[in-house]
Image: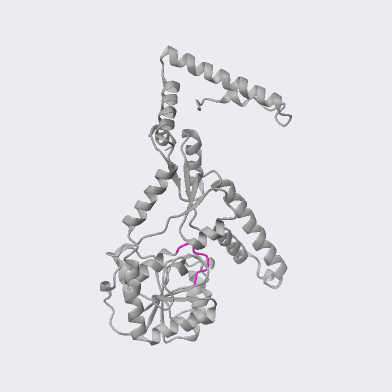
Amino acid sequence: MLSYGLSQEFDVIHVATPGHMGITGLYLSVKSSRPLIGSYHTELPRYVSQRLLAYLDPSFDEDAEALEYVESVSAALTWDYLACFYNHCAKVLVPSHYTRDQVGERLRPPLDLFPRGVDTELFRPERRSRADGRPRVLYVGRLAVEKNLDWLVSFGGRHPEAELVFIGDGPERGRLQRALPEAVFTGFLRGEELARAYADADVFAFPSQTETFGNVVLEAQASGLPAVVTDRGGPREIIAPGRTGYVAAESEQFEQYVLELLRDADKRQAFGKAARARARQRSWDEVFDGLWGQYRSVCYPPRRRLWLRCLRRLRDSENPFAVGLVSFWRQFGRLRAKRQAQASPLLTGAPDRGDSSDEVSP
């Protein structure tokens, strides 16, 4: 894959995560002298902290100081890694204003918005086939500790008249099934099957507090569902409070809003129509037009691209003149590195990095 990437005349490299594929993109950016754009769309410090806390021995629950220490140190170490990675980028794209505020003080590169779109032909209210029955509350997403699903456990325990449906899977599924034996757990659904599940619900309840955007909220809106979300994270920016759904600050308020929508069919219908209209404004074409604009904003000027391509051709050429010029360039680079090492006490005695270089750089 690396050889393929280096053989193509790319203008920009875009990495979606700081994982192993992101590190590969970073390497290619340095190797090919191409600008790097990064996406930040997962609140990793909070994910890491919450998962570590979930795996601690239950005896730690009584030691608030220890829990706070584990949470703060794990988040700080994660931020250190993220800054080390993303600070190599020419620009970092974030999905929401909330996320931009969260990372703005921690990363050096300029930040810009890269929101999400939704397929309003796939997700639409007309897919509803369910007849009248128990009011249905839907959750879609991973069943994991960072999704704050205890709010739904609390709701389901106090309101057995409502049918809870969980779409997705994850490490918390077993615990949730034991806590909510009457709830429906479908596992992963995709395509039209997922779209029908959205349309057959009455209210979308999404208690996660770690979302940078919340694509599932947008899919629910496109399906004509009012949604209840929390006041922390990107989903609150998708909701028009009092028109397409509600934003809750704590568990009791979350429960109150879900019940209000379940018990008032007229309000639920009005919110659903407004949500569908709002979702139709989020086309993928518009989103990707904006992304291409981001790519153009960091592309090297044409003259610089031509200069870099010329240098690579010289490096790979068997022409005697090109071979001699490249040899001179490398020798010049070694001498310059040696003089810099001698001039700086911090570099005295450092190995001559120019000897191992096989690159021609401008």
Q: Residue at x 60, y 50 (%)?
A: 81
Residue occupying the point 54% across, 60% down: 101
Query: Which sits in the foreground, 135 or 219?
Result: 219
Image coordinates of residue 335 in percent, x first then y, are 62, 20
Q: Nearer the viewer, residue 327 or 187?
A: 327
Going 38% across and 34% down the picture, which residue do you hit? 9
Q: Is residue 267 above or below residue 322?
A: below
Q: Which residues are magenta?
A: 207-213
Tell me if residue 293 comes above or below residue 360 in the rendering: below
Residue 140 lies in what quarter of the image? bottom left
Query: Picture coordinates of residue 239 (x, y %)?
Result: 42, 71
The residue positioned farthest toward the right in the image shown:
345
Residue 112, given in percent of the width and then of the height, sits at 47, 53
Check the image and name the residue furthest to the top.
Answer: 320
Residue beneath the point at 44% across and 84% down: 259
Count of marks, rendered view: 0
State left or right for residue 199 relative to residue 213. left
On screen, residue 288 versus residue 141, left or right, reads left
Please say which color scheme the image uses: one colour
Q: Is residue 197 at least partly visible in the picture?
A: no
Quarter of the view holding residue 141: bottom left
- Judged by its main secondary structure, the magenta piece is loop
Visible residue check, residue 137: yes
In the rendered image, residue 204 lying in the magenta stretch gets the answer: no
Q: Position of residue 343 (x, y in %)?
A: 70, 25
Q: Is residue 266 left or right of residue 256?
A: left
Query: Where the N terminus falls, by quadrant?
Result: top left
On screen, 294 above or below 123? above
